[in-house]
Image (cartoon, coloured by chain):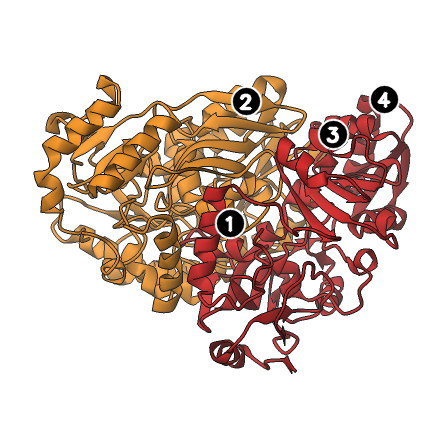
Amino acid sequence: MDMPIPSSTVLNNKARIVSRLAAILPADAVIADPAATRAYECDALAAYRCAPMAVVLPRSTAEVAAVLKLCHEMGVPVVPRGSGTSLAGGAMPTADCVVLGISRMTAVLETDYPNRFVRVEAGRTNLAVTGAVEAEGFFYAPDPSSQLACAIAGNIAMNSGGAHCLKYGVTTNNLLGVTMVQMDGTVVQFGGAHMDAGGLDLLGLVCGSEGQLGVVTEATLRILPKPEGARPMLVGFGSSEVAGACVSDIIKAGIVPVAIEFMDRMLIEVCEDFAHAGYPDCEALLIIEVEGSDAEIDEQLAAITAIAQRHDPVELRQSQSEAEAKRIWLGRKSAFSAIGKISDYMCLDGTIPVSSLPFVLRRIGELGAEHGLRVGNVFHAGDGNMHPLILYDANKPGDLEVCEALGAAILKLCVEVGGCLTGEHGVGIEKRDLMGVQFTATDMEAQMRVKDVFDPAWLLNPAKVFPLESSAGRRAG
Amino acid sequence: MMMRPAGEAELAELIREATGPLRIVGGGTRAIGAVAGEVLETGGLAGVSLYEPGALTLVAGAGTPLSEVEALFAGERQRFAFEVPDLRGLLGRGGEPTLGGMVAVNASGPRRVQVGACRDALLGVRFVDGRGVVIKNGGRVMKNVTGYDLVKLMAGSWGTLGVLSEVSLKVQAVPEAEATLCAEMAVGPAVAAMSQALGLPYDLTGAAWCGGEVRLRVEGMPGSVAYRTGAISAQLGGDWRVVSGDESAALWRKVRDVEPLQGMTGPLWRVSVKASDAPFVLEGLDGAAMLDWGGGLVWYCGPGDVRGRVAALGGHATLLRGEGVTFQPEAPAVAALSAGLRGQFDPRGILNHGLMEA
């Protein structure tokens, strides 16, 4: 994985850049000591690391604007950072950059229950948004696995999803407005507390733009009344193909569970060891959760059970208690850390049409065997968002490279069946060089022209998303 | 003379070779504002290329008539969740609504309050920009964050960034049952009642004030619909009439198509505001009004400085008929970005030129 050669002009100018940053920010908001900047050398894609030139931790939109204006004037690249939980390297620094972390901007600015929205500073964590409104019976719907730690700013940058977005949608469907600072320091607002964009949908454009168009400092988020109750059920199958067919039938029947999660045998065993949720011994497992009153849940689960029974399930079980429901979800939500305990792994994020599930699962098994690596599957089956986990040994020379080659082969497979490279994690640096698999040069050029409008000098998170050779003429470095 | 390309390649060629402004027309049922230029009609870009009911996905040419797609859906008990308004009655138009027109204006009806707008169901687009270049973005899958989201940008861009050639959309299974709670109310109490109902955990799929009557809709499995209508009326209090099945569906077609304002003359406004601001938009105005989206969408026909009020409250107003600027003017920095994007995608300024600028 290549990154641009750091600009010697910027590096040679470090002392002056840092002293000017220090002049516009409080003393504790600028970090330039190499021992301290090391803490920002990577995000959750920890295989790639590079300490930044400096880190700034502003406390207000005005401070963010002052930093960006200064960096713009001095030609310094800026890498925005929420909580640093990106799985795609979205917050990975370059040696010549200033990391702009907004972790100190966490305030709740406005809660409005009659109109069902909350306005927060974008450094606030995902779960703390729900925390601010749950006493009144509301919640914020998108729920990425890292929701305890991840910041709303990062959720917006990557258009994050989560297990429950089958019913509630992803970040972009729950985002009403933002305050954003452009690279030149201009502060703009898109959307607001009303529902629709007025002119061009710049809010929709900014969401998922991976911190390349501006730094979001405030967000207006849609909140929803908490359902009366929720209950998961487990259905075990003798093969992944059958489980896939069952998913398709449930969706077609018009039942909208809040989540349909899929695990294959490897993940079932690993997660069971971790969470002791009582997962059955089988080849494929679906966790299906529905919401409503007790009677409504019974009605929906009866309909789902009738469909599942047509697919000859190995086991079919409704959760009997709150504690059991929690353990069932603990197993699923801990999948990545449970795998992490037994092996190094790479997590992929391609999406495929639900109808292609059986074929794609079989091909992933074959590709794994060809590359000599094990692949586990755990994913959001209702919307086809796969998360193949490739197990490898970081201490074994060459294993990471084989793993990367297998990952690329699987993502190409996703695109071939009509899907995409990434469903919710983002491109970052991780899938940057695969963009050509999904897009023509013309398609990428159209996207880069958008960045030209927002950040003509290409200083904001510049070495991400687009293959370096495609963006070479635009980036300064 | 009218241009009617038979396919995407011909569309690209026509735009590349255009020497003057073009007025982009789908079925001509939703067009607003004054646009000069030679007519470029998209009816030749028609046809469903993929409909997979099990994956809830439709891919079709932008010129495909909406009625053709709806006939296809009926056989599978599916629909567009966002409930496409038919504005022919309101605007006094003929013609056949097309998928491209629906996407270009982000046409979204009552269910938008729960499931999102057309832009939220739009999975992918192919379009030809003002340089005559064919561009693809998004795809046909439900979750996709690969690259920038030009799909959202195209929805509601009114043909000013490019001419859509193909769209892919998410569809929804039609629930088994629906019911509507109705009660007559003045606008202030109506907005308060809708707000209270939308704050209950019953997934309302419609909350409108139409003909002086509040309408609250629930959809789902029969047991659930019966339970929720009972729970909502009990928690709101007062007398609610419950209407079910086809009769309920008929009520919502009237909301969707803004029936109370059909056949009128005079300035016609479509206003998007915070729901609790709707009564302030209408305060002291003596025209006709209808509210949808719990009050977040205000339809108003009559005199008054609607745009000034909306500017003060936050939100935006679109003038569908009457003398004046069509779209709400944007803050200078936002307008500069919008103009910048138009400059990139349509550098000659030939696609529906001037329509969205203040």
The colour chain B appears in is: red
Residue B237's mark? 4
Quadrant in which the N terminus of chain B appears: bottom right
Disc 1 marks which residue? A381
Res. B309 visible in picture: yes
Q: Which quadrant would residue A259 be assigned to in this image?
A: top right
Chain under numbered label 2: A
Disc 1 residue type (three-letter) = Ala
Whole-number angstrom distance, CA of label 4 to CA of label 3: 25 Å
Whole-number angstrom distance, CA of label 4 to CA of label 2: 29 Å
Residues packed near mark 4 inside 10 Å, few (<14), some (14 to 19) or many (20 plus):
few
The colour chain A appears in is: orange
The answer to whether residue B226 is left or right of residue A351 is: right
Residues packed near mark 1 inside 10 Å, few (<14), some (14 to 19) or many (20 plus):
many
Disc 2 marks which residue? A110
Residues at marks 2 and 3 touching, judged by CB atoms closer than 8 Å:
no
Q: Viewer-proximal residue, A455 or A227?
A: A455
The answer to whether residue B234 is left or right of residue A145 is: right
Disc 3 marks which residue? B280
